[in-house]
Amino acid sequence: MAARFKKLIKRTGLFLGILIILFSSFLIYISLKDYNPPDFMPLAYNQTNVSQIEDSTTLSIITWNIGYNGLGKEMDFFYDGGKQVRTNEKLSLKYLKNNLLFIEKLDSIDFWFFQEVDLHSQRSYFVDQMQKLTESLSEYNSVAAINYSVSWVPVPLFNPLGKVKGGMMTFSKHAPIEASRYAYPNIAAWPDNLFLLDRCFILTRFLLPNNKHLVLLNTHNSYYVTNDSLRKIELDILREKMLEEYNGGNYVIAGGDWNRLPAKFNDVFRGDMTKLQIAMPSFHNDFLSQDWMWAFDTVQFTNRELNFPYDELESKKSSIDYFIVSPNIELIKNFVFPLNFENTDHNPVYLKFRLKEINLHKTDRQ
């Protein structure tokens, strides 16, 4: 009996030892393969249009997190309390097709910001969505930045997310003079940081007739890091860049998926607050001086929770996709396209604006 027990202990120990070795080897492999871009990276852009922005031009921009065309109304997601890991291939292709059809109809838009665009990922069946977008917006200049590149995401254990490679894209009808990737610090703890996004923002710069610049910042900020003080590190970096450009006399628009409510949201939002997602953080009112503008729809939400498939009556929602605009820009129109989360978990946000005549504005020293 004792000999049998000792043999069982020995086999159990051997089995656990093998598991530890395998797991350690996996972490070493992932660490060696970890995507670690520099803080600043010039980006090559695909130029198909050389037009410049003219004086007093009215311009338009849309930001849209397309959720790798895998998070339509039928989906929930295990990271957010749901059960599913990825949609089936048929639905994934359907979501992609429908989203591209919507985009192609809006061929008068000057600028597009996209987040969560897959390049080569198991969750989207290795379809090159960046190429698909580029083909649909063939008259636009385009630039892409990778912010998620992991050889193998091992969760859930029995149906892992697998290989992920994707990022963000900015499209423009006007020729940029600069396109750059600015990295946010990796604020997640080890080993989580090996499997989460390497967050960043894309800066595109456009020359204006007055020799100043229109500076567009496409951002996708952290969500799965629960310590909000760490998440604010990203925002401080972006704010510093916004103020630097504005204080230099340039025109600045930052937009994208902020993963937090805009400043003064509770004061001005007139939609159904009973639908608001619980515990969504928000910007403090003093994040920027009062002459900066927060361009968000005051009635329509932009995002829905993924703890179960979309239900118009039961699903909680939030407004985390919008623009922050410098004081030297005039806002003309701003709204959310009410697509009812049919083909992704975010609705696109539209902004129409005009650049004011350049003048000597006071330096914002926040």
Image: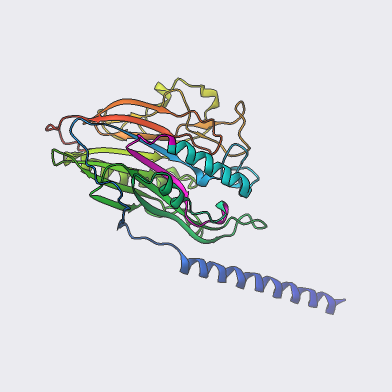
Query: Considering only vertical position in the picture, is 185 above or below 29?
Result: above
Residue 257: x %, y % from top left: 42, 40
Q: Quadrant of the C terminus?
A: top left
Image: 164 above or below 13: above
Count of picture labels: 0
Residue 48 seen from this side: yes
Does residue 90 show up magenta in the picture? no
Image point (54%, 67%), residue name = 27
Residue that lies at the very extreme toward the left in this rendered image: 360
In the rendering, at what x and y percent does residue 217 appear? Answer: 31, 43
Which range is magenta? 105-123
Q: Residue shown at 76%/74% (left/top)?
A: 9
x%, y% of residue 80?
Answer: 58, 43
195 or 55, which lies in front? 55
Q: Seen in the image, is 346 located left or right of residue 51?
A: right
Residue lying farthest bottom? 3
* Furthest-right residue in this view: 1
